[in-house]
Image (cartoon, rainbow, N blue to C red):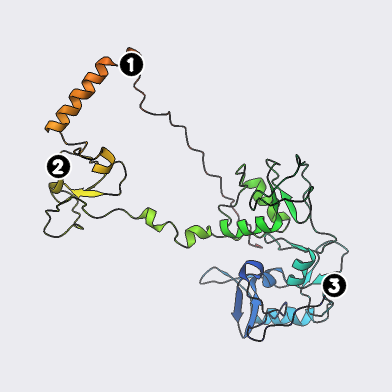
Amino acid sequence: MKRKAPDAREEACVLCRRADSDADKYGEKRRNGGLCAHENCLYLAGGLPVRRASETGADEFLPAEIRRVVKRASRKLCYVCGERGATICCHQKGCKRSFHFPCGCEDGCVSQFFGQYRSFCRAHRPEQQVQAHQDGETSCLICLEPVEGKLSHHTLVCPACKHAWFHRGCVQRQALGAGFFCFQCPQCQDREAFLWEMSSVGIRVPLRQPTWEAEGAFEELYERHGRCDASRCLCARGREEAAEEGPWQLLLCSSCAAKGTHRRCSALRPSTATWECDDCAGLGTTSSTQSGTASASTSRQAASSASSQAPASSRRSGQTGPERRPGRGRLQRRSKQPYSRR
């Protein structure tokens, strides 16, 4: 297999000699001591120790040790492309095959991104051993496209439910997005068995929070509404004034929490603990917590009349909604980081 020529515009990795910058496939590029290398190539290179930075606690690789690995690999031929500089060795006992990380990916080699960061050639790569059968034509649960009729390197199945089938590439993209703490089977939501099985067959699950949280996609959901939405705000300091108590204390709607009001702007008594906006209470109605007004009195009269006509069984039932179920406990985190060689 002929290797692609390095892109002159990009700095090439000293371990695989490729200039590709696809972080999802090769990992981020690291530069230190005048050397540039892909993260995946660094972690998987045979004989290259991982150091722990004393200040940040992050993994690091010393330039001198990288040069030593590159020099030793200059005598090894990649069994895929036939060129020298293969830094990754098959961990199967008795196998002497070596390869570059990108070449191994193209040939179907498997690398495990946890523990000792072992790699295996195509002939010795680990395969799923779970007994699972398909009922007719089966589609990938992620992309909904058809999968192969049996387990293979490119077709995987959840070891827990045994009904969720995936393309390898689809599971890998899901793992990169979900990260270690949210990676699970999309169907049965199993985490422990699914994470271990997928990691063992070469799916890289980065030790990080999901990308949708890291990118701040839901930051607005954590922001508290902070202004008075009364039709006429009486506060001289403006609608954003929010005192902890008193007439300018800002109360949020008890139903939607998307609108607020100062106590004085809605004529709320000091004893009123909650308030409901017009959209939630119904247009033309007053606050659900105001008492002593004509509309509130009318509402109570209507409610009293309705209750007197309701069946006795309805009045006896004090249940106002479905019974709450106890929430599922979070999965226990492993005591050791699976992405550390220590």
Query: Could you tell me how far apart the alpha carbons at marks 3 and 1 are, in whole angstroms?
Result: 79 Å
N-terminal label among 1 and 2: 2
Mark found first going from the N terminus, 2 or 3: 3
Which kind of residue does numbered mark 3 sit on? Tyr
Between residue 184 and residue 68, name the one nearer to us.
Answer: 184
Residue depth check, mark 3 versus mark 1: number of the one nearer the observer = 1
Depth check, mark 2 against mark 3: the one in front is: 2
Name the side, left or right, on which 46 lies relative to 339.
right
Quarter of the image for residue 96 reads bottom right
Secondary structure at badge 1 equals helix
Residue at disc 3, secondary structure: loop
Q: Residue lying furthest right in this view?
A: 94
Q: Which residue is mark 3?
A: 79
Q: Residue at horizontal 19%, vertical 26%?
A: 300
Residue at mark 1 to residue at mark 2: CA–CA distance: 33 Å
- Residue neighbourhood size for the residue with mark 1, other residues' Cα within 10 Å, grouped as few (<14), some (14–19), many (≥20): few
CA separation, marks 2 and 3? Answer: 79 Å
Q: Position of residue 113 (x, y in %)?
A: 68, 62
Q: Nearer the viewer, residue 62 or 308?
A: 308
The label on residue 144 is none
What amino acid type is highlighted by mark number 1?
Answer: Arg
User: Dividing the image into 4 quarters, which one contains the C terminus?
Assistant: bottom right
Which residue appears at 73% of the width and 81% of the height? 68
Q: Which residue is mark 1?
A: 316
Q: Position of residue 285 (x, y in %)?
A: 20, 37
Give me the disc on residue 268.
Answer: 2
Q: Is residue 112 depicted above or below 66 in this figure? A: above
Q: Disc 2 marks which amino acid?
A: Leu
Q: Is residue 54 visible in the rendered structure shown here?
A: yes
